[in-house]
Amino acid sequence: MVALSVGARASDTELSGAEGHPRARFPLGVWAQSFGDVALDATVRRALDDWNAVSRDTLGVTAFAPLERRDGAQVTIEAAPPDVSGLMGQTELSTDDTGVIAVPVRIVVIEPKSRGQTSRETLLYQVVAHEVGHALGLPHVRDPRSLMCCVRGSVDFTDPAARDAYVDARRHPDVRSVRAQLAEHYARFWRDRR
């Protein structure tokens, strides 16, 4: 087993793009810890619903089935208080030697605080949706408009167009921005395991 830990603050990731789940495993049972705030809990659910819409459209499968209890969950999303690392979220997963992701996958999300013009709900949506992408095996990409951005050092913030695209994508995160990446990733992953 290869253990991977992926952080959501433009950190490097060890995901190679060869990791994934077998088709028969979907939908993945997911349990999310309450943040103790109705709006934040609804934001987590919306991120999962948006992933389901994109995965049904691109893969023909529902990605996630929300669970009321942690027991038996294949993906867990845990809330954590702020810490000194500065990370906003982290996905812990491991794979076998063929790239199949072992379950359960653990996602830890730091309770968000609004930043400038970006609300707590928007930040939480961005982080949860990004980390859920990692739980599906998606690595970081270089596209500043993508929810799965960014490979460290790949965005040239001195370029106004790249900077504006990055900022807009953080203020208006959209799971649909990874549609092509998800489709290509799983077409390759499932084909290679036939």
Image (cartoon, rainbow, N blue to C red):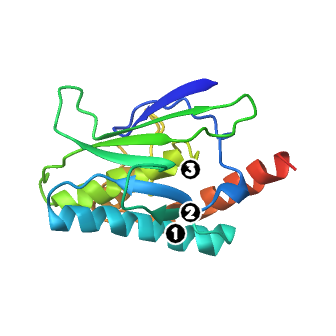
Residue under label 1: 52
Q: Quick check: marks 1 and 2 in contact, CB under 8 Å? A: yes
Indicate left or right for 78 with 29 as reference: left
When asked about the image quadrant of residue 55, the answer is bottom right
Please name the amino acid that badge 2 sits on. Answer: Ala
When asked about the image quadrant of residue 60, the answer is bottom right
Please name the amino acid that badge 1 sits on. Answer: Asn
Residue under label 2: 63
Residue at 63%, 60% (x, y): give it: 26
Q: Quick check: marks 2 and 3 in contact, CB under 8 Å? A: yes
Residue 191, given in percent of the width and then of the height, sits at 83, 52
Residue at 64%, 24% (x, y): give it: 1
Residue at 61%, 24% (x, y): give it: 2
N-term-proximal mark, 1 vs 2: 1
- The answer to whether 83 is drawn above or below residue 158 in the figure is above
Number of the label disc, if any, that sits on residue 157: none
Q: Regarding mark 3 in the picture, which secondary structure is present there?
A: loop
Residue 93, given in percent of the width and then of the height, sits at 52, 35
Number of the label disc, if any, that sits on residue 136: 3
Residue 140, given in percent of the width and then of the height, sits at 51, 42
Is residue 1 visible in the rendered image? The answer is yes
The CA distance from mark 2 to mark 3 is: 9 Å
N-term-proximal mark, 3 vs 1: 1
